[in-house]
Image: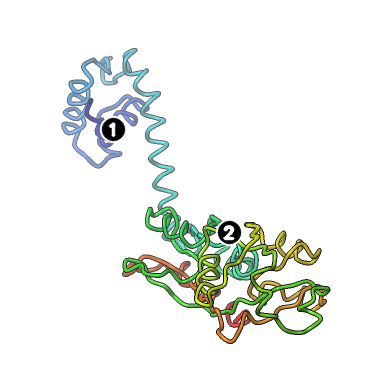
Amino acid sequence: MSVPLDSRQLRAFSILAANGSFTQTAHELHLSQSAISHSMKALEDDIGCRLFDRMGKTVVLTQAGEQLLVHVERILEEMSVARAELGHLGKWGRSRLRIGASTTACQYVLPAVLREFKESFPQCEISITPGDTPNNIEILRAHKIDLAVNLEPRREESLEFRPLFTDELQFVVSALHPWAKLGKVKRDEIARQHYILYGKASYTFQMIESYFRQDKIVLHSLLDLGNMEAIKELVKLGHGISILAPWTLRKELKEKSLVALPLGKRKLRRRWGVLHWKGRRLSLAEETFIGLCESVAEKLG
């Protein structure tokens, strides 16, 4: 494997190629003429060919020097662009923010948060990666995202969870369902219902199964979907019932196309929050994002 060329030598080579004078090159770089001469000799030795021909007091590029100059100009341009882009990161509002979020958070939490965030950081580059809590933890550990908005994980000692709000899962039925007309759930009918639930790989699904397992109830006839709007539409049409948090169907509850009913005497609650690496100092953009999430959460909670 060849050793990379010295960037200082390349810069001196580029300037010397442009003006043809060791004296002027030394002046521009605030070095001695001898230093420039030695630097070019070292570059020629490193490459293994002559780069300049002397013509009186000036120098001109050899064929090898002309070929090298094409690459050097490209390299120096890339270095200049990299320096400029990195410099922007230190300026107000110029940064990036990579967010992982559950589909529920993407749909009901992030729109309001991002609308406010972009007013404070209009030039911040934001990327959103949808995914449930287990997936968010995985990509957060791989440093592919900076923050994750999702449910509280069970045990993640290396990650810090900043709570936002707590919700409660309830049965959701169409307005024409017998339970809706009765105004309550018949316990002996729970196991006989056709359920349309959110993602089997999700924490929510696991929490629901665990909740009913304690009452020795097994939910049968399950349809597993990853889209909240599709679940609500199927329930409206009477194709089954679901178990959701009322804050995700406020519109439907208000227009009375769906009805929410408690699961039972025991409540099934979830905690939502923001995950990040424990002990990592958050940027101003990250702290602002979390603060806006907390403001939106006050209305949802």
As drawn, the residue found furthest toward the top would be 63
Q: Position of residue 5 (x, y in %)?
A: 25, 30
Nearer to us in this view, 195 or 122: 195
The residue identified by callout 1 is: 12
Of 185 and 286, nearer the camera is 185
Task: Please tell me which residue is depicted at 40% across the width and 23% down the height of the picture.
Answer: 70
What is the quadrant of the C terminus in the image? bottom right
Residue type at the position of mark 2:
Gly
Q: Secondary structure at mark 1?
A: helix
Dot 2: few (<14), some (14–19), or many (≥20) neighbours within 10 Å? some
The residues tagged by marks 2 and 1 sit, at their Cα atoms, a distance apart of 61 Å
Q: How is the image coloured?
A: rainbow
Q: Report the residue marked by disc 2.
A: 199
Is 89 located above or below residue 253 in the figure?
above
The residue lying furthest to the bottom in this view is 265
- Vertical order, 268 against 19 (above or below): below
Q: Label 1 amino acid?
A: Ala
Name the mark nearer the viewer: 2 or 1.
2
